[in-house]
Image (cartoon, helix red, strand yellow):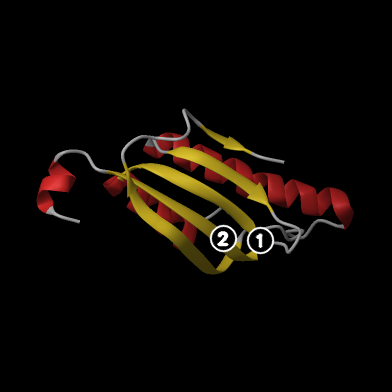
Amino acid sequence: MSALAKASGALKSVDYEVFGRVQGNGGLRGACGREAAAARMRGYTEQEAKKLGVVGWVKNTSQGTVTGQVQGPEEKVNEMKSWLSKVGSPSSRIDKTNFSNEKEISKLDFSDFNTRY
């Protein structure tokens, strides 16, 4: 992306999928424990996104991953990508994060960041 685009506040959109122990039971037993751990990952993702000022969504998949979309100023989206790749929730273990459909956009498709079910 050009320096001019960065200076003009270019917006970026990217889809993501996080692999690892992101829905695991985190030491808790049974379905309630898995849901609690998954809720923590989703909650921390939503919290981080709101802190950075990006918009989009997060949800669990039936394959045990966490997926979603992030939109916002390029610099903030890149910060969120780093967080999704390296940090996550305190009880998560991130093995890898795939990013796809990364593109510059002219306007945001969302007004907030939220959890989908």
Give the structural element (helix, strand or loop) at label 2.
strand
Find residue 65 and name its label. Answer: 1
Residue 62, position as x, y percentages in the image:
76, 58
Q: Are marks 2 and 1 in contact (CB under 8 Å)?
A: yes
- Foreground: 25 or 16? 16
Indicate the quadrant containing the C terminus: top left, top right, bottom left or bottom right.
top right
Where is residue 93, by image quadrant? Answer: bottom right
Q: How many numbered badges does the structure rendering display?
A: 2
- Which residue is at 61% across, 41% downward? 43
Q: Mark 1 Cα within 10 Å, few/some/many (few <14, many 20+)?
A: some
Q: Amino acid at mark 2?
A: Glu
Measured in 3D between alpha carbons, the distance from the residue under mark 2 to the one under mark 1, in whole angstroms, is 7 Å
* Left or right placement of residue 85 versus residue 41 in this view: left
* Left or right placement of residue 86 versus residue 104 in this view: right
Q: What residue would you read off at disc 2?
A: 17
Indicate the quadrant containing the N terminus: top left, top right, bottom left or bottom right.
bottom left
- Which residue is at 69% across, 44% downward? 39
* Left or right placement of residue 113 versus residue 9 in this view: right
- Which residue is at 21% across, 39% downward? 9
Q: Amino acid at mark 1?
A: Thr
Give the structural element (helix, strand or loop) at label 1.
loop
Q: Is residue 91 visible?
A: no
Residue 77, position as x, y percentages in the image:
36, 48
115 w.r.t. 78: above or below: above
First reached walking from the N terminus: tag 2 or tag 1: 2
Residue closest to the far right: 30
